[in-house]
Image (cartoon, rainbow, N blue to C red):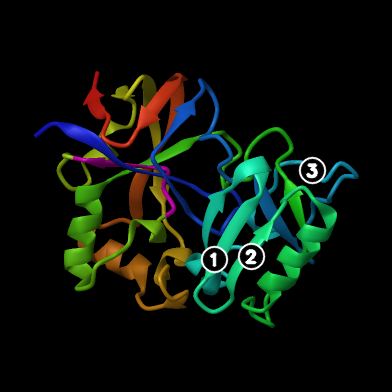
Amino acid sequence: MTATLARIFRHPIKSVGAEDLDGTVLSAGRSLPLDREWAVLNDRAKITRRPDGRASEWGRKANFLTGRAGPSLMAVTASMRAGGRLRLDHPDLGLLEVDPDGPADQTRLVDWLRQIWPEDAPAPTALVRAPGQPLTDESVPYVSLIGTASLADLSARAGIPLSPRRFRANLWVEGWAPLAELDLVGRVIRVGAAVLRPVARIGRCRATDANPETGRRDIDMLPLLERSYGHTDLGVFCTVVEGGPVTRGDRVEVL
């Protein structure tokens, strides 16, 4: 079976909203455009917000709001609108449209998120923009990738259908055997016009316990992965070796 690119996701604000794309353009040595371009600092953050609105530096996820601490964040969906505005939706909060670089709208966003953020978790304080590199959990600008068969196999073991939004990967490939992508570390693959090199497996955290339809934890994911496969990895981090456009339905081949 020919492997194809089935889904493309980006997450403009770290842990807050997934956006389903038809296509994008990857660049060598960069992450997917506008993926984790913003993040919400918490009141225990060790990094600060500069006058230009950017984070003072890349920081670990403990500095930000995350789905692990606030599972309801996982139910936010996102879409970038004309003029750089960002539209967010949540099943309990409804719609919010903001300019993520506008001070007044940043305050509106933080206030909106406070309504679904746990009272016993470090409180949200400010939205910051990436300091020249995405505010992902990794300090290296990766693109993440998972095979759809891996998700289907895990869903069968869980006994419930699992949404790809639960795992917040950028690229989903259809046509490989379950977990085949884990064996591609060190190889090279072509996705559309881009060339990627899988470099590491993605170790999972408790954010994946939350159902992205409801924002509520409905599964204990790490023990399920361990029982099923003997590890808690799902998907791979990739570096972009050669940039180019990628579109849903593009052919994916191992070189």
Question: Which amino acid type is shown beneath numbered disc 1?
Answer: Asp
Residue occupied by mark 3: 54
Q: Residues within 10 Å of mark 1 (few under 14, many from 20)?
A: some
Residue occupied by mark 2: 96
At which x and y percent is residue 91?
49, 75
Camera-nearest residue between 150 and 93: 93
For the residues labelled 3 and 1, the Cα–Cα distance comes to 24 Å
User: How many numbered discs?
Assistant: 3
Q: Residue at x 22, y 25 (%)?
A: 253
> Of label 2 and label 1, which has the lower sequence position?
1
Question: Which amino acid type is shown beneath numbered disc 2?
Answer: Leu
> Of label 2 and label 3, which has the lower sequence position?
3
| Residue occupying the far right of the picture | 51
Q: Residue at x 64, y 79 (%)?
A: 118
In this picture, which residue range is highlighted in magenta?
168-174
Query: Compared to 189, does 93 lie above or below?
Result: below
Residue 89, disc: 1
